[in-house]
Image: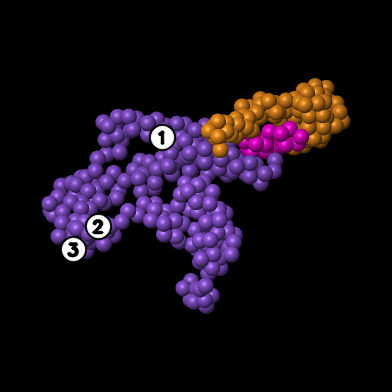
Amino acid sequence: MIETLVVVVRSIIAFISLLIFARILGKQQISQLSFFDYITGITIGSIAATLTTDLTSRAWPHWVGLLTWTILVFIFQWSVLKGRTIAKYIDGEPAVVIMNGKIMEETLKKIKYRASDLLKLLREKQIFDISEVEYAVFETSGELSILKKSEYQPLTPKDIGLLTPYKGMSKELIYDGKVMEQNLLYIDKDKDWLLNQIRAYGFGAFEEVFLALIDETGNMFIDGYKDSIDPKEQKSLE
Amino acid sequence: MKRSVRIIIPIILIAIFIAVMTTGALLKRPFGTEDDVMELIAKMETEVLNNEWDKASQHLDEAKKAWTKVVHRIQFSAERGEISTLHKSLDRTEGFIKAEDVGGAMAELAEARHIWKELGK
């Protein structure tokens, strides 16, 4: 028995299986995960690790375990999506910990958080004075969502009646030296036009450009492979 | 990539993985005359009972070679413990054959049979 080869083959099986199962389970962000999602994720990962290196048992039972946990998580996800009651039971409910500027001590006790934990979370949100907060909601993912009192909200153009032009989303015209022809077609331009644009920025060919973007107003951002930054200055930044 | 291809590729991969992990019981079967471990064990049992120690010793060498061939095929679907125990059982049989101990040799061969039966299940 060549142990190294067996571990390599088992690693490939575990890695690709995890990849496929993760794709089936969806694209939840780490911040969106509930405590239960987090634990199930760790368990699935742990089973995959055992599948890889525990040669004292066959790979098959571990793989079945991996599959069963994935199916169970999938069923849970599906039932959470379909039923609000089940979702509340499984994920819990967001808890209001500050209401109208007042700390809800009972709620804090219920979710097993101390006042110091709350202050820490507020500081992480750049709030050092609790009197600035109107509402604070402890989300099921463990994140704290905050609504500041209106006098502490940042000023927006709308507050002072300022009209702002529509910005929209930038489109990639050149990515890694390659022209994104579909995006060019979308903005009704051609390669000649793009070549003229990059020439205006001092580039001779598409291959010299690392990234070229255009926004809805027609403004371009072009970045080449060769940057005119002093290497010494760059090193000092590193 | 087409949706059908995106679905078919993972299905094929999963099917290959399942085959690699579960075909131990199938792959332990002899593919020719030189890798039939069970037949060699049966021959050894008869020879040990008839005190034909030279023949038993010769068949034991063949059984060891056959087992090494089988191990290459089943290593991805069998336990390391099972593989190692059958190795040890054949090694111990060698000792009993040298000592011309019928009881010991038969006990070891019976254990080898049992391990073989459980192998890749």
Query: Which chain is home to disc 1?
Result: A
The hue used for chain B is: orange
Q: Is residue A164 above or below residue B40?
A: below
Residue A1 placement, left or right of A61: right
Q: Is residue A111 above or below residue A90?
A: below
Residue closest to the eye, A114 or A41:
A41
* Residue tagged 1: A73
At 51% from the left and 66% from the top, the residue drawn is A200
Q: As shown in the figure, which amino acid type bears the numbered disc 3?
A: Asp
Which residues make up the magenta segment?
Answer: B68-89
Q: Position of residue A204 (x, y in %)?
A: 59, 64
Question: Disc 2 on helix, strand or loop?
Answer: loop
Residue A95 placement, left or right of B110: left
* Residue tagged 3: A129
Colour purple belongs to chain:
A
Q: Is residue A114 magenta?
A: no
Q: Position of residue B105 (x, y in %)?
A: 75, 30
Tell me the distance, in whole angstroms, between the alpha carbons under discs 3 and 1. 41 Å
Question: Disc 3 on helix, strand or loop?
Answer: loop
Which mark is first along the chain, 1 or 3?
Answer: 1
Q: Quadrant of residue A134?
A: bottom left
* Residue tagged 2: A163
| Label ID, residue A57 | none
Q: As shown in the figure, which amino acid type bears the numbered disc 1?
A: Val
Q: Is residue A233 above or below residue B19?
A: below
